[in-house]
Image (cartoon, rainbow, N blue to C red):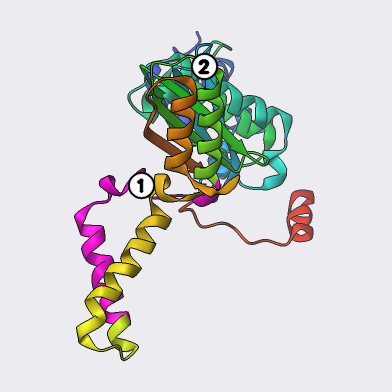
Amino acid sequence: MATAVTAQSVKELREKTGAGMMDCKKALMEADGDMERAIDILREKGLSKAAKKADRVAAEGLVTIKTNEDNSVAAIVEVNSETDFVAKNQDFQVLVTDVAEMALDGNHGSLEELLSSMHKEGKALKDILNDRIATIGEKLDIRRFEKISSNGKVAGYVHGNGNIGVIVELDTDSNDERVLSLGKDVAMQVAAMNPKYISRDDVDQEYIEHETEILTQQALNEGKPAAIVEKMVVGRLNKELKEVSLLDQAFIKDSDLSVGELVAKVAKEVGSDIKITRMVRFEVGEGLEKREENFADEVAKQLK
């Protein structure tokens, strides 16, 4: 008589191998509930690779963006791989697109909720991820996502081969195509210049105090008279705030305009107020330690 396969045994096998839930269930059924035999079955089928990849760093990958038809909702996701080579793999790119579409269509409050949601193949997204790890042979990681729903418009821009993505929210009543064009230009600006704040009004006091302290010390170290240090610091701080505040930055397509002036110009053209209310910028691998490895060595490892 075959041993019953329980939810607990499936969970245990999944934790040991990193394989998908349905693959674990099938392996346990084939092994009549024998855990060690089930592990061997998964190994034989190449489905336990995910666990072997767990301690690797996935710092390459892709950022992508999906928006709905009326450009009122957008989702941005980052999915990581170990190498840039895999980031160009079609299966990986399809996975990233699937994740973005799920983030856009769903109402997920956390990454765990997104990972637990059902993929169109009939499995939880985290199980699909493990399947792709087994197929592609590298550690993959759905690192983060963000979804913006707006009463105005949202616009996105993905730079290059998907290494930087930006979503910008525009508060406006206009449906003019020029608003979306503006949004894309502003998103491109954010991608290129990486501002910390939308406007000077958003700059927190702690940041100003910290920068003032540093700039004051710099001026004193330069031997400037104490009497003029304060005025110098004000001037330097204003210059710095201009660089970190989106609306104060010179527009990259026309340096005669600031981004704020560009927004005002388009608002006048379309006859409606436009306000940039939010920006989300994802850069692949930011904050992660990237693996430095010789490509020839990597190929040699794959052949072992």
- Residue in the picture at 26% in, 59% down: 207
Task: Identify residue for label 1.
Answer: 197
Task: Identify residue for label 2.
Answer: 176
Q: Secondary structure at mark 2?
A: loop
Residue 67: tell me if it is visible: yes
Q: Secondary structure at mark 1?
A: loop
Amino acid type at circle 2 is: Asp
Magenta stretch holds residue 223: no
Amino acid type at circle 1 is: Tyr
Relative to residue 93, is residue 198 depicted above or below?
A: below
Residues packed near mark 2 inside 10 Å, few (<14), some (14 to 19) or many (20 plus):
few
Is residue 184 rendered to the left or right of residue 245? right
Relative to residue 88, is residue 226 depicted above or below?
A: below
- Residue in the picture at 44% in, 18% down: 73
Is residue 66 rendered to the left or right of residue 277? right
Is residue 242 rendered to the left or right of residue 54? left
CA gap, disc 2 and disc 1: 26 Å
- Residue in the picture at 31% in, 91% down: 223
Residues packed near mark 1 inside 10 Å, few (<14), some (14 to 19) or many (20 plus):
some
Hey, which quadrant is residue 174 in on the image?
Answer: top left
Hey, which quadrant is residue 43 in on the image?
Answer: top right
Where is residue 296 drawn, in percent x and y? 79, 59
Magenta residue span = 192-218
Camera-side mark, 2 or 1: 2
Magenta stretch holds residue 206: yes
The one of 122 and 78 positioned closer to us in this rendering? 78
Residue 124: tell me if it is visible: no
> Please, which residue is most extreme toward the top here?
1
The one of 295 and 60 positioned closer to us in this rendering? 60
Q: Provide the major secondary structure of the magenta segment.
A: helix
Where is residue 115 drawn, in percent x and y? 44, 25
Where is residue 91 drawn, in percent x and y? 69, 28
